[in-house]
């Protein structure tokens, strides 16, 4: 078991039996107050429940919303700002809603994005912005793919939604591909973190071939690299 796996197991054990936070709407309102949110024309967000209201707010606030397809298999969907009727917003920002309301993006369309803010939830986050997620590595890979395909702004940043109890006082184990958070937003407040500028990248040598094949944009990049 790696250090990160041990930390993830320890956090899950520590959180067992603790009542889940339900006031994520308050966290979403706090996000609205940040300048980085106000400045963002396009926001990437993962599909977790803590971000549900934040995803709705993005569309209401005139921002393009980018979300991953399930397991990133088909790549990324775009929900253009104000493209969804108000009554359909809650359903539109879920996986089922993406297929009905979103636009599946091809590589060229991704290169025309200008994502300045990325949002995700976490199992835990530390004072340096290091985070532990669910163990699948989807968020970090999404960031790397968006960067590789030209969809990220140069001065992008990432924030995570977590309960206060899941902000670690100690550093969490990190891997080379892990994306540091610029801050953590809880229903009770905002924590800002300082860390060096990052350039997300795909660690091809560490990705199993079968995983590359399962993710369409990743497979296309891999195939293009081999031809080149």
Image: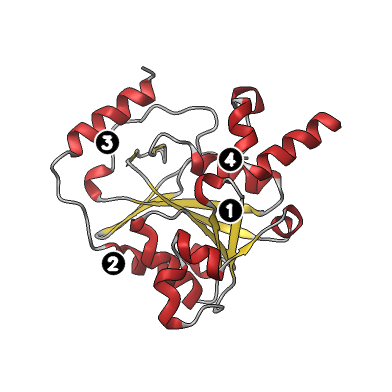
Check disc 1 and report the residue beneath it: 156
Circle 2 or circle 4, nearest the eye: 2
Q: Quadrant of the N terminus?
A: top left
Q: Are marks 3 and 2 in contact (CB under 8 Å)?
A: no
Instruction: Measuring from the top left, give residue 96's x and y in whole percent.
Output: 46, 62
Q: For the residue carrying disc 2, how many other residues have a C-alpha within 10 Å: few (<14), some (14-19), or many (20+)?
A: some
Instruction: Measuring from the top left, give residue 211's x and y in whole percent.
Output: 58, 32
Q: For the residue carrying disc 4, how many other residues have a C-alpha within 10 Å: few (<14), some (14-19), or many (20+)?
A: some
Q: Are marks 2 and 4 in contact (CB under 8 Å)?
A: no
Q: For the residue carrying disc 1, how many other residues have a C-alpha within 10 Å: few (<14), some (14-19), or many (20+)?
A: some
**Residue 199 found in image quarter:** top right
Secondary structure, mark 4, is loop
Instruction: Measuring from the top left, give residue 195's x and y in whole percent.
Output: 49, 40
In whole angstroms, how far apart are the C-alphas of marks 4 and 3?
23 Å
Secondary structure, mark 3, is loop
Check disc 4 and report the residue beneath it: 198
In whole angstroms, how far apart are the C-alphas of marks 4 and 1?
9 Å
In whole angstroms, how far apart are the C-alphas of marks 2 and 1?
24 Å
Residue 24 vertical position relative to residue 132 in the rendered view, above or below: below
Left or right? Give the position of 4 relative to 114: left
Q: Closer to the N terminus: mark 3 or mark 1?
A: 1
Q: Closer to the N terminus: mark 2 or mark 4?
A: 2
* Residue nearest the viewer, comparing 94 with 115: 94
Q: Are marks 4 and 1 in contact (CB under 8 Å)?
A: no
Q: Are marks 3 and 1 in contact (CB under 8 Å)?
A: no
Residue 96 vertical position relative to residue 71 in the rendered view, above or below: below
Left or right? Give the position of 150 relative to 122: right
Q: Closer to the N terminus: mark 4 or mark 3?
A: 3
Residue 26: image tag: 2
Residue 169: image tag: 3
């Amino acid at each position: 078991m790696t250090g990160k796996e041990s930390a993830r197991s320890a956090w899950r054990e520590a959180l067992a039996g603790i009542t889940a936070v339900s006031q994520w709407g308050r966290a979403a309102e706090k996000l609205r107050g940040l300048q980085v949110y106000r400045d963002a024309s396009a926001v990437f967000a993962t599909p977790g429940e803590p971000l549900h209201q934040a995803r709705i707010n993005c569309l209401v606030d005139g921002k393009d919303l980018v979300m991953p397809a399930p397991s990133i298999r088909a790549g990324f969907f775009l929900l253009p700002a104000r493209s969804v009727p108000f009554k359909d917003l809650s359903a539109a920002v879920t996986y089922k809603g993406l297929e009905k309301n979103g636009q599946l993006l091809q590589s060229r369309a991704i290169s025309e994005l200008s994502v300045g803010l990325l949002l995700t939830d976490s199992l835990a986050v530390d004072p340096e912005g290091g985070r532990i997620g669910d163990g699948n590595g989807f968020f970090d890979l999404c960031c790397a793919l968006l960067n590789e395909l030209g969809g990220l702004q140069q001065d992008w940043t990432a924030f995570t939604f977590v309960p206060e109890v899941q902000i670690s006082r100690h550093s969490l184990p990190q891997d080379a591909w892990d994306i540091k958070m610029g801050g953590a937003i809880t229903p009770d407040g905002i924590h800002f973190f300082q860390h060096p500028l990052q350039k997300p990248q795909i660690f091809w040598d560490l990705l199993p071939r079968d995983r590359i094949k399962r993710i369409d944009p990743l497979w296309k990049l891999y195939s293009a690299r081999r031809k080149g």
